Image (cartoon, rainbow, N blue to C red):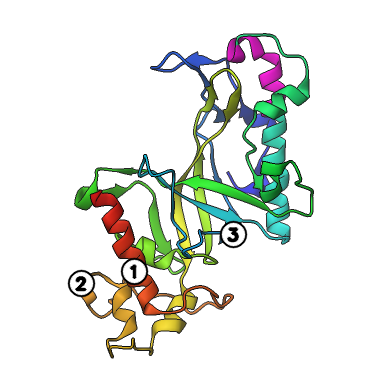
């Protein structure tokens, strides 16, 4: 559903059902179809190591990206849409609180305290968020298999439609990279009768890779090896499918050297082996 065409009246939250673990969930739909939305262009937040793809706590190898929204018209429209979904989710949770939480809850503030916000702010954790605090969205990157047999469920591409695969996902999605993401809304989950929310799963991630091409096209590492070789599988020259586009974008501040890319991938590889 395009943000400009979104109609909150077609966003449905049917009666809760029980999942395989016995916990209640709501299988949301839009006009009786799976809910699929698209972000505007967002800036990848990343971690302190400048990696754009982040890991949940080390007890799991699940991965995600966080994208910060700006103050563009497209972002403001997206925020408005997401707030309308959240408000409907809160009112539904109050209406069906006995089924979802095992008790009647009449105070909207209690429901809000239970909710993981659909769009988050850094001030949320301290209760200090204001409208001036930028919003960001957290998107899961689901996959199947492990190690060398691992396959992403989302597809990754540059803005020209060229596929990004395997380790290049880690190399090209760095802190401050610009991306747009088509994503699915998973069923509403309820945890411990006191926490609920809607997980988002990325389906198509479009990466603006211009910065990386400009940075590495002619540069060489300290050993004299062409830096751009690190961006493609098997250290081969880029093929037509790998070549990134020429669109203008902000220059990345954090992808400083080819060593960053090599080190990042080794770290991810070692994590999987462990």
Residue drawn 44% across the image and 13% down it: 22
The stretch of residues the image draws in magenta is: 89-101
Q: Is residue 16 magenta?
A: no
**In the displayed structure image, the side of residue 41 where residue 217 appears, left or right:** left
Residues packed near mark 3 inside 10 Å, few (<14), some (14 to 19) or many (20 plus): many
Q: Nearer the viewer, residue 162 or 191?
A: 191
Disc with the residue nearer the chain's start (1 vs 3): 3
**Disc 1 from disc 3: Cα separation:** 25 Å
Q: How many marks?
A: 3
Observer able to see residue 176: yes
Residue drawn 30% across the image and 52% down it: 271
Residue at mark 2: 234
Residue at mark 1: 263
Percent coordinates x, y for residue 199 in the rendering: 52, 36
Task: Provide the secondary structure element on which disc 3 rests.
Answer: strand
Q: Which is more foreground, mark 1 or mark 3?
A: 1
Above/below status of 130 relative to 35: below
Percent coordinates x, y for residue 50 in the rendering: 48, 65
Task: Provide the secondary structure element on which disc 2 rests.
Answer: helix
Percent coordinates x, y for residue 216 in the rendering: 40, 83
Residues packed near mark 1 inside 10 Å, few (<14), some (14 to 19) or many (20 plus): few
Percent coordinates x, y for residue 143 in the rendering: 33, 44
Residue drawn 59% across the image and 75% down it: 250
Q: Which is more foreground, mark 2 or mark 1?
A: 1
**In the displayed structure image, the side of residue 201 where residue 231 appears, left or right:** left
**Disc 2 from disc 3: Cα separation:** 30 Å
Task: Provide the secondary structure element on which disc 1 rests.
Answer: helix
Residue at mark 3: 42
């Amino acid at each position: 559903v395009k943000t400009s065409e979104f109609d909150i009246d077609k966003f449905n939250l049917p009666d809760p059902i029980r999942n395989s673990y016995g916990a209640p969930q709501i299988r949301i739909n839009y006009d009786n179809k799976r809910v699929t939305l698209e972000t505007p262009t967002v800036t990848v937040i990343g971690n302190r190591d400048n990696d754009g793809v982040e890991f949940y706590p080390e007890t799991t190898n699940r991965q995600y990206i966080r994208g910060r929204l700006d103050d563009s018209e497209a972002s403001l429209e997206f925020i408005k849409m997401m707030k309308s979904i959240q408000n409907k989710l809160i009112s539904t949770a109050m209406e069906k609180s006995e089924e979802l939480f095992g008790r009647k809850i009449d105070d909207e503030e209690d429901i809000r305290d239970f909710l993981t916000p659909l769009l988050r702010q850094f001030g949320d954790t301290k209760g200090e968020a204001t409208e001036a605090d930028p919003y960001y969205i957290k998107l899961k990157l689901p996959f199947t298999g492990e190690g060398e047999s691992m396959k992403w469920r989302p597809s990754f591409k540059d803005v020209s439609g060229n596929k990004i695969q395997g380790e290049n996902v880690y190399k090209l999605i760095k802190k401050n990279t610009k991306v747009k993401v088509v994503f699915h809304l998973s069923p509403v989950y309820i945890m411990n009768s006191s926490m609920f929310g809607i997980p988002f799963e990325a389906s198509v991630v479009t990466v603006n890779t211009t910065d990386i091409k400009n940075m590495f096209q002619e540069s060489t590492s300290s050993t004299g090896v062409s830096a751009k070789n690190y961006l493609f599988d098997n250290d081969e020259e880029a093929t037509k499918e790998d070549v990134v586009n020429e669109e203008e974008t902000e220059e990345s501040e954090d992808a400083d050297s080819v060593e960053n890319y090599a080190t990042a991938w080794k770290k991810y590889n070692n994590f999987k082996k462990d």
